[in-house]
């Protein structure tokens, strides 16, 4: 158990809809990262938050947004969903160290039909 | 930009065989290097890491040495077990004030047969 909790584990939704994925980081970790794992794109970094502020952005679509709340949990919002958004979405957390490794949740599998 | 290249799989081995998965990287400066493992239906788990040149990371019989001269971080295990069947990801991270996002290779699926 990594200590990172993601909900829900599975999500099936229709094209055009909006969903919210939730992540609770390990106790004490201030950084939260979101990654997308798909068959064609591999593991792609989407966005990072540190103590409530956006710190880095990767290949995140404009239809996607995220935030980190005062209790440090984070949500990834995906809107106007397309079939190609079907993927495994991982959240990871780390503490602010120079070589601190990231701890990953078990992921949310999103299927858009 | 940063990138990680690792050998494509799948790699199929018999139990007790020797495993090598090649990984090379492109990055400026001195990144930290990682191997993550993903077992079926699970998230990614850190397998081992190395933070500077010539460091050797090791865990559960797996080893990898940070070779700056060849920009490589190859994963090895001397005798694999069926339970080592998984997807292995090589990754790098460069510390910035903004944080330590990971850049991953494409993953290598390993299947160990009894």
Image: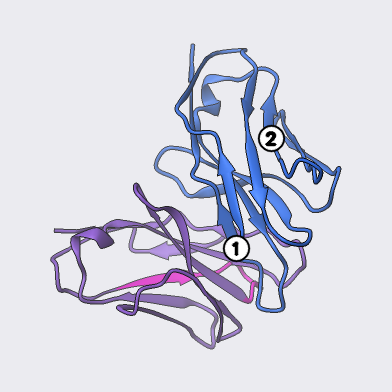
Chain colours: A purple, B blue
How far apart are the two marked residues, 2 and 1, measured between alpha carbons? 21 Å
* Residue A26, percent from left and from top: 59, 66
Q: Is residue B87 magenta?
A: no
* Residue A2 visible: no
Badge 1 crowding class, 10 Å Cα cut-off, few under 14, some 14 to 19, many 20 or more, is: few
Q: Residue at x 41, y 57 (%)?
A: A107
Apparent side of residue B105 relative to residue A63 in the rendered image (left or right): right
Residue B100 circle label: none
Is label 1 in a helix, a strand or a loop? loop
Q: Residue at x 79, y 53 (%)?
A: B51
* Residue B95, percent from left and from top: 72, 68
User: Which range of residues does the magenta coloring cover?
Assistant: A20-30
Closer-to-camera residue (B96/B83): B96
Q: Is residue A24 magenta?
A: yes
* Residue B15, percent from left and from top: 56, 13
Q: Residue at x 62, y 12 (%)?
A: B16
**Mark 1, chain letter?**
B
Residue ID for mark 2 = B74
* Residue A30, percent from left and from top: 63, 76
Residue ID for mark 1 = B1
Q: Residue at x 49, y 45 (%)?
A: B106
Apparent side of residue A37 relative to residue B100 in the rendered image (left or right): left
**Mark 2, chain letter?**
B
Badge 2 crowding class, 10 Å Cα cut-off, few under 14, some 14 to 19, many 20 or more, is: some
Is label 2 in a helix, a strand or a loop? loop
**Residue depth check, mark 2 versus mark 1: number of the one nearer the observer:** 1
């Amino acid at each position: 158990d990594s200590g990172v909790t993601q909900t829900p584990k599975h999500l099936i939704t229709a094209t055009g809809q909006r969903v919210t994925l939730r992540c609770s980081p390990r106790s004490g970790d201030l950084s939260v990262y979101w990654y997308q794992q798909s068959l064609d794109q591999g593991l792609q970094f989407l966005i990072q938050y540190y103590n409530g502020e956006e710190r880095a952005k990767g290949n995140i679509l404009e239809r996607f947004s995220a935030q980190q709340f005062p209790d440090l949990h984070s949500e990834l919002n995906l809107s106007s969903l397309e079939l190609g958004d079907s993927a495994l979405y991982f959240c990871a957390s780390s503490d602010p160290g120079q070589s601190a490794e990231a701890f990953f949740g078990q992921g949310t599998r999103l299927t858009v039909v | 930009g940063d990138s990680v290249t690792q050998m494509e799989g799948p790699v199929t081995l018999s139990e007790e065989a020797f495993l090598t998965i090649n990984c090379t990287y492109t990055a400026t400066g001195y990144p930290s290097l990682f191997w993550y493992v993903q077992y079926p239906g699970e998230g990614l788990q850190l397998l081992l890491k190395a933070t500077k040149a010539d460091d050797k990371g090791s865990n559960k019989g797996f080893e990898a040495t940070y070779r700056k001269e060849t920009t490589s971080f190859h994963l090895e295990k001397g005798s694999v077990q069926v339970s080592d069947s998984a997807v292995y990801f090589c990754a790098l991270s460069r510390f910035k004030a903004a944080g330590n996002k990971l850049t991953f290779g494409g993953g290598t699926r390993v299947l160990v047969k009894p």
